[in-house]
Image (spheres, coloured by chain):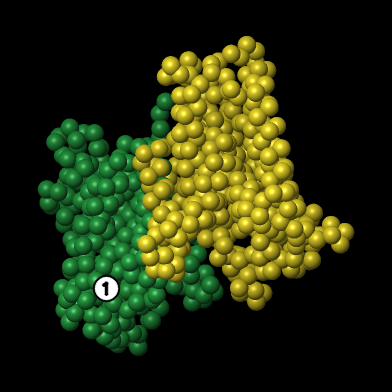
Chain colours: A yellow, B green
Amino acid sequence: MPFASGYFRTSYERDMRLLDTRAQIASLAAFLVALAAFPLVASSFLLDLANQFFLASIGAVALMLLTGYAGQVSLGHAGLMAAGAFTVGILVKEAAAPFWLTIPAAALVGALLGVVFGLPSLRLRGLYLAVSTLALHFVVIHFGAEYETKRGFSTGILIEPPSIASFELLDARIWYCVLATAAGATVLLALNLLRTRTGRAWRALHDHETVAEALGINVPAAKLTAFVITSTITAVAGALFAYYRGFVSVEAFSLFLSIQYVAMVIIGGMGSILGALLGAAFVTLFPYVVETLIGFAPTPERFASLVFAVNYAAFGLVMVLFLLFEPEGLVGIWRRLRDWFLLWPFRKRPLAGSR
Amino acid sequence: MQLAVNIVVLASIYALIACGYVLIYRTSRVLNLAHGELMMVTAYLLLTTASLFSGHPVTAVAAAALLGLVVGVAVYVVLMRKMTGERVLAAVLATVALGILLRGVVVLVWSAQQQYPAQALGWTNVALPLPGGAQVSAAAAALVLTTAVVYAGLFAFLRFTRWGIRMRAAGQNPLLAAQRGIRLHAVFALAWGLATFTGGLAGMLIALDSGLEQTMVVIGLKAFPAALVGGLDSLVGALAGALVVAAAEVLLIHYVNPLLADVVPFLVLIAMLMIRPWGLFGTREELDRV
């Protein structure tokens, strides 16, 4: 069994460890081997799917840190991704900058925008904060659209694949390695951040702002760091997205993308990095599943031209169903299943806080 | 002069939509981000009623607006009723999800092409001359009139009728209101119905003026800053906010850059959130206590 059935930690180091049991280390190793072997056997379609998942999971983990842990709602996630993608697009078009310049630049832009997105959070809460990020999303998108029209790229900016000394990064397998590493690094960063003083401050913020302040947490600083760190990650995800697609256009960063990221966090389950990954996988795979299901419908031709509409409707419906019937998300289902098998014949965990 | 007319028309569009946001927020503290979509659904319902009552534009519009009211109540009963008492944010996200769902459904039922309900009704939209050389289309004039009537009606409703007073009570203190025997669910459902009704009126008149397609959602979303600038729980505020936002939008488009159209309301919104988050006429939200 890769999980402990109870709370057997006897020291603080043990409690802080990311991997609890030897079986967990073993299963992680097996997972990594499978991840490394995947590109050798997968078709190009599956590879593209995996790459999309990695890209989505970077953004989803960032949003999970912000919303699920620090409790700051953002409906402007697509705006931040757009900022990263457009930084790459503009630098490549205007200065022919190589990727080792554009990606840090995108991170820098993300950090600056993080401050901008975060400033309203010092005054506003909940609903009003969500609205202010929504408004900032439109502002960022406006600047992108203005650049496109002013420079005559009204359909979008084409970006050549990044190259290292005349070696072009084109192959989906190499992209797989790059994106898997980036996603892995993000997850590791997130997990480690949550074990630090900053991460604990964020959780305290989430639970109760006034109490957090009374406990001596610098609330404005904690909020701003949450925004800056997650915006940086998101902008880098946007930059990678730009390179991977080879194309930047404002249409790709509509409000719907922001909602998709929020949906990843909700469907995955608030307050869990695993949830962010599950949510990213769910949302990435969802349109393909819908398409396959339409294929089984009695009259597939009727829906063929309306695939995107069916997608919208089904996506909205799934989101509603999760909010109504499974507020803990996929991770909640997973936890219940796991506990059922681990604890049988008992029902409840011995200690509420144990993972 | 034409500019002033444009401002008034745009302001009444925003005001008519914004009162839906205000009604729902004021009674149930839920921000309805699906308002634009609900408005669009009602406008599309006009296409259906237009084929039933062709040649009677007023009957068709009234029938569609009543259907909109039913849709609004149904949304509350089926979906939002379950979200009362949940965290505020969950409710908002539920409306977002509902919006996405409705967008898909609209395309599935009515197709994504641009439609002209005015043609279906057999009604021509003439341009009326105004003193000072300005022009206004008949649908836009109807819109300004409708806004005036709706606001007058809402003020009277909230002040003098039994249900209006119940609605205000539920908004001020739901617990005490429930203690006094007010059925909160009925009041909230009525708020959703009225909001969809007024939003639907705006949607239908816009559709009569300039055709009907998916982009109507954007207008619905752009009216939200008007509601917030005025104060999310104040009807007078929604009027004032609509005027401010519309004036800023029309003037900036005319004198600075037409590309700004989609972003001006949100810039105004950000400015307002920085200075006075509770809006011009809104009440300050309570600080939370330990």
Q: Position of residue A204 (x, y in %)?
A: 53, 28
Work out which residue is located at the far right of the displayed protein and give it: A165
User: Dot 1, how many residues are within 10 Å of its Cα: few (below 14), some (14-19), or many (20+)?
Assistant: many
Relative height, residue A25 to residue A48 (above, below): above
Number of numbered discs on residues: 1
Q: Is residue A220 left or right of residue B7?
A: right
Q: Nearer the viewer, residue A26 or A10?
A: A26
Can residue A197 be seen in the rendering of this structure? no
Q: Is residue A121 left or right of residue B236?
A: right
Q: Is residue A87 left or right of residue A283?
A: right
Q: Which chain is indicated by disc 1? A: B
Q: Residue at x 62, y 31 (%)?
A: A194
Q: Quadrant of the C terminus of chain B?
A: top left
Dot 1 corresponds to which residue?
B47
Relative height, residue A2 to residue B279 (above, below): above
- Mark 1 belongs to which amino acid? Leu
Q: Residue at x 77, y 58 (%)?
A: A169
| Secondary-structure class at tag 1 | helix
**Residue B124, picture quadrant:** bottom left
Work out which residue is located at the far top of the displayed protein and give it: A10
Q: Position of residue B75 (x, y in %)?
A: 28, 52
Relative height, residue B14 to residue A185 (above, below): below
Q: Nearer the viewer, residue A317 or B57?
A: A317
